[in-house]
Image: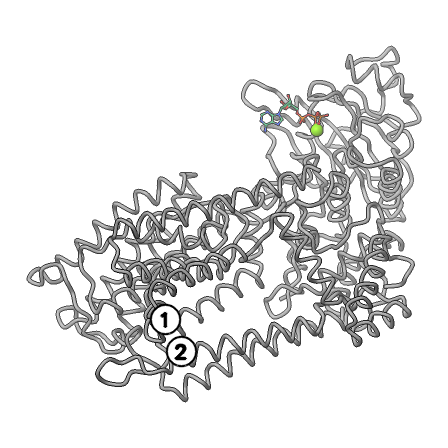
Amino acid sequence: MSGSSRTPGEFTREEVTSTTDRSAGSAPNTRASEVALAEGSELMVNSLGEYVQAWVKRIRNGDSGVLPVLGGLIAIVIIFQVQNSLFLSAGNLVNLLVQGAVFVLLGMAEVFVLLLGEIDLSVGYVAGVGAAITAILASPFGGSWPWWIAIAAGLASTVFIGTLQGVLITRLHLPSFVVTLAGLLGWEGVMLFLIDHASPSSGGLISISNNIIYDLVNGNLNQVAGWVVMVLVVALFAVSIVLRDHHRRSNGLAAPPPSLTAMKIAVAIAAGVALLLVCDANRGVSIPLRGVPWVVLIVLGFLGMWSFLLGRTRFGRYIYAIGGNAEAARRAGINLSRIRTTAFALAGLTAGIAGIIYESRLGSISDNIDGGTLVLYAVAAAVIGGTSLFGGRGKMIHAVLGGIVIAAIYNGLGLLGVSASTEYIVTALVLLAAVTVDSMTRRGRATTSAR
Amino acid sequence: MNESFLESARPGGAGRAQKETLAQLNGVSSDAKEPGVTRRSLGEPTEGLSGKGHLNEVEPLLSLRGIDKSFGPVQALAGVDLDIPLGQVTALVGDNGAGKSVLVKTISGIWEPDDGQIFWEGRPVHIRNPKEAAEMGITTVYQDLALCDNLDIVQNMFLGREPTRYRLLDETAMELAAKRTLAELSVVTVRSIRQAVASLSGGQRQAVAVGKAVMWNSKLVIFDEPTAALAVSSAAMVLELIRQLASRGLAVIVISHVLNEIFSVADRIAVLHLGHIAAVGPISEFDPQKVATLMATGTSSWSSHESDSPSDPREL
Ligand SMILES: Nc1ncnc2c1ncn2[C@@H]1O[C@H](COP(=O)(O)OP(=O)(O)OP(=O)(O)O)[C@@H](O)[C@H]1O
Ligand SMILES: [Mg+2]
């Protein structure tokens, strides 16, 4: 774009950029931005300083993103580590990740509907129904079907349930709170029926007889495979952000400064190596036990897939649009019922996966799983992570961070040997803190836009 | 994917211009200096449309006949007859609550009329939803702007019409086109077009809504009080833009309470009073005093001049 069409505001911004650069003394950036200025081209180089400034500004405006939950997580870790040095041991950390997986997956299911400004209270027992169907089909009295058929059938049932609830909500214009509250009761009934009728003699407990389903949580990647996967994932991440920045720059659009990109990649490498080192330490009691549990990979896979869906596709964009202003989305020609129903179906699918992970960890599915508490943890995970209950704001990573916070509280208090009562109270306080942050953020935004 | 989407979004749209938009979106990496979507849409007249610009001789693009719309006991529109010709700016005026916004929303597919007929290019049509309106080539700047606060400027400008590459959102193409449009409009300066709309001032939001509407090669562009929140200079810019759209051969409907604006921008004027058309005709047959009287009372002392009432649809 030529200099003449540049708006005055952007001029100021470039000037600010170059000054910051000089004072920060980062030589390469300074030169690059001066070249950009000399050519009169579009704002191409943004210094690290400017990015940090913009970031601080965003936080001041109330868009704090994952900061509160990261801060909270660090505080929780420090508190528990001081109380019991076993907390940060490799064995306990892996245990924590595995415990968190169910909360994380259920939280992800909830994110899909919370983004729309809706809620799904049924995910706990939907997970239970999917788990029961999978367990029954894989068991001898259910026909000993191969693992993938059992899992596919379980997930198909939860997708069906999600779609059914979505259709009721969108076509009959019923509130999601009520429809999924009915689901919370009704699907528990269906789950009990399935478990009790499939195997009346088993006393309401079906154990997982399929090794592969059992290994989803209890099996580990061997060490070499773990490192190979880690290197591939980090390389994919690095290549994709470098390519994206390059594409933007070559089109004359603002892109993050290379130093920031390098820092992001360094953080990804560090996180990957740390995860692998923790998982590769021997955590066995009598026999050696090492490697990344499969479930960690499964959770990361869904995190990547769902984040991609929300961030890079029209479907994802429309979910945010509906959550932000449903009427505006409708006037933009978006098919609201289709997007909403699909979101409920995806919530069902993700809940089904959580259910299968849950039974894999326990090695069985029983008729006394508490789907009511699970759904509360699911909503808590999403909200603690930073997803707004009021729709339109949130990400899949929030469910991951929130789920880990809940697992850390659960795990840490367990290590300290405190009672369940304390655990509930602490989780409640953390949840309240998270909702407070959310509503303060909203108020911050409201005042910003009113100004 | 990209192509099929945009094509399907506006099968009735101006074909040539549409192709160019596509080329624009696809060819983002080739030449950043190429004139943008808006430059083209505002600058070069599109053939086939601009040739018919002679007043009153054109077949109306849109004709409304006997449109009724009630909300419970409130009859918002009562037998509205109105013709909207190509290449002209039709001003729609009326007191608060006269039914202007309801009429605009009926044309835009937000509501179907309770009764009456809509003719588009002479053919009877039913505009059942906003998507169908968009596909016909109707774009609207709503009085309430209809922006998503949680999305950024680019995301709002392309909402519902996002270009894709390999089925993924083509953010670069969107950002480039949005940037060009806003730069050409130069109505309001924003710090970054990637900032959330929630953080914009009222005037900036209105500018985004206007930019969103003129990016597409429509046949009819409707502005419901587009200058209400704008500073004088920005308002002048928007009025200039409205003139440009009309001189390009598009049909334009403008709603405004500022009679000075109306008389500087409109070719025709329609006065709405309590849900029915009190008067309609070329702007030359009106003066501000008469329009004010019509808006307030629904009649004027020169009622004999209301001769330019819409022709019978059977004559179309
Ligand atoms: N969604 C709705 N539900 C019920 N009544 C409505 C609705 N929308 C409009 N009305 C009624 O229809 C009438 C016309 O409203 P409309 O919004 O068209 O007025 P307007 O001419 O645009 O006024 P203004 O100049 O204030 O924007 C009003 O009496 C209003 O109360
Ligand atoms: Mg109005």
Are the residues flagged by discs 2 and 1 in contact, CB closer than 8 Å?
yes
Labels 2 and 1 within one chain: yes
Where, quadrant-wise, is the N terminus of chain B in this rendering? bottom right
Relative to A176, residue B76 above or below: above
Q: Residue at x 63, y 45 (%)?
A: B149
- Asked which secondary structure carries label 1, the reply is helix
Question: In the rendered image, which residue does mark 1 sit on?
Answer: A93
Relative to A95, residue A225 above or below: below
Q: Could you tell me which chain the residue with mark 2 belongs to?
A: A
In the rendered image, residue A153, in percent from the top left (x then y), is placed at: 29, 66
Q: Amino acid at mark 1?
A: Leu
Q: Residue at x 67, y 59 (%)?
A: B6
Q: Quadrant of residue B63?
A: top right
Does residue A407 appear to the left or right of A363 in the view shown? Answer: right
Where, quadrant-wise, is the C terminus of chain B in this rendering? top right
Does residue A63 appear to the left or right of A336 in the view shown? Answer: right
